Image (spheres, coloured by chain):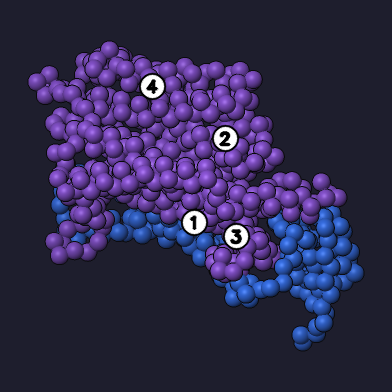
Amino acid sequence: MSQTFAFENKQDFLDKLTQLVKSGVSAKQISLNTPYHVHEVEHILRIKPSAMRFFAAIGALSGTVAGYAFTIFTVFHWPIITSGKPLISVPPYTIIAFALTILFGALISFSGFLILSRLPSMKGITATEEHENRFVIVIDNEDKS
Amino acid sequence: MQMNQTNYFNELERDVLSAMKKPNMSYWAALGFSASLLLMWALCWGYQIKEGLYVTGINNPVGWGIYLTNFVFWVGIAHSGTLISAVLYLFRAKFRNSFNRTAEAMTIIAIMVAGLFPIIHLGRMWKFYWLLPYPNQRLLWVNFRSPLVWDVFAVSTYFIVSLVFFYVGLVPDLAIVKRHVKGIRQRVYSILSLGWTGSLRQWVHYNKLYMFLAAFATPLVISVHSVVSWDFAMSITPGWHTTIFAPYFVAGAIFSGTAMVLTLVIPMRKILSLEKYITVDKFEGIAKVLLFTSLIVTYAYIVEFGIASYSDNIYELSIFKYRMVGDYRVIYWIMICCNSLIPMTLFVKKLRRNLVYLFILSIFVNIGMWSERFNIIISSLSHEYMPYAWGLYRPSFIEIGIFVGSFGMFFTFFLIFLKLLPVLAMSEIKEEAE
């Protein structure tokens, strides 16, 4: 059994949400759908910070390591001195490591987003019910215990 | 806005998505024209592949002709997409919302066009994959100390990150498009939107992802064109071997990219009737970016000349004098007029807010920035150290055909973008309107 509240503007939606939380409805029972990100909701529902930052950090770090490791591996695999430069030439390899830091950071962050947001979602792809531009609160009253 | 939020959002969606409806005759005419230029590009390149590089004007001493000029020019054009999307997002510049989608699309298309030019420039273009590091039967790896390999990494990273950023920005809007179309199109947009519903969970992570992507993309604005500049600055050719090249190229890239955004958005706004969302105030914001970067570029021109004069190096000094009064002086003075003198008029507020003027100015800046790239590459190579090794370069018809055809490719893809994807970031405009 669930209850749905739909609003035409943000302020009414936020007022209702605040009222529900004050009346004892837990954040776990509440599902929201909004046409854009409403930042105040995170404060009202005391949402934990997104774990996206871990994906971003791991991605960036792995890119840096991969950049240096790969360039150093290749020069030892076939050692050729070019232009009298040392085999491990840190400044040019830093450019490769920098590019891979950005690349891996972006790609792993995107993968993290898909995992955390549970996308792609077949339910969402095939959904027929649309909330359009309304601000929607759904209260799930079912006892899941 | 509070009372009529939903009505405003519905109106916004209707206005933006009406651009994606059945094209009219003028659209087909524009597409036909740009596609014919694209065909000319393909024919010219096909002929060059068949005959070899002798059909170009490239020879000693100018081994980098307008193909490399075009590469640098198009990479530069690609830059403002990231500037407008990522950098202005981090700085919370509100005028970005009217331009970011177009600028991002422009970035993707411009990098694709740019990426082709080094391949076109190769004598045996089918060997282009030798630039990539992969295990091979020769047991050799690419030379990671070479600026050309840095380019491969920098430009391909830029392309992939820009594509991810573009797609992520599109996801909520694709879900909106899904609601407004029927049949097979609805199914396609449903899949492309990944089943986005606008739930709290999705928005929280989406918001963080967008911020991280902006943070990752921002250093790319600096790094990619710095790396492109090092293609030149790492050599000892007079006029190239200077430490100012990286910031000079980055500023130039933002300058040219911003101009191209104006070239695209001003007519697009009129044709698609988006005056309500892309206001004159927002154009003024972009015009200020254009003016600011023009000042940096002008400063770089002066400093570059100052360094050469102060160095007491006859080769450096000679090349700067040659640029001003030598065989390519017309290109040099076009560059100065279009990039340094004409943009100064943007100090006048009335002109910053005049869209016809901004459109004409943006064309001048595009011409000026292409001339700058030509001036840097061609004049330095044709007038290096030894007078007996000097020589002139004239592009052949094939090179000109490929150059003009690259605009055909750019505009063809851009016109296709207009009909397939929403041209404004609707979710962001909704948020801004609250």
Nearest the camera: B279 or B198?
Answer: B279
Per the image, the residue denoted by label 4 is: B335
Nearest the camera: A46 or B48?
Answer: B48
Is label 4 on the same chain as label 1? yes
Tint applied to chain B in the drawing? purple
Chain designation of label 4: B
Question: Residue B174's mark?
Answer: 3
Per the image, the residue denoted by label 2 is: B266
Distance (Cα) linking label 2 and label 4: 23 Å
Amino acid type of the residue tagged 3 in the rendering: Leu
Chain designation of label 3: B
Q: Is residue B195 above or below residue B28?
A: below
> In the current view of this chain or complex, which residue is farthest to the bottom?
A145
Which residue is at 57% across, 26% downward? B356
Amino acid type of the residue tagged 4 in the rendering: Met
Is label 2 on the same chain as label 4? yes
Amino acid type of the residue tagged 1 in the rendering: Val
Nearest the camera: A80 or B244?
Answer: B244
Which residue is at 83% across, 50% downward? B4
On the question of residue B112 being in view, the answer is yes
Which residue is at 58% across, 32% downward? B286
Classify mark 1: helix, strand or loop.
Answer: helix
On the question of residue A18 being in view, the answer is no
Distance (Cα) linking label 4 and label 1: 34 Å
Q: Is residue A120 above or below residue B392?
A: below
Mark 4 burial class by Cα count in 10 Å: few <14, some 14-19, many 20+: many
Question: In front: mark 3 or mark 4?
Answer: 3
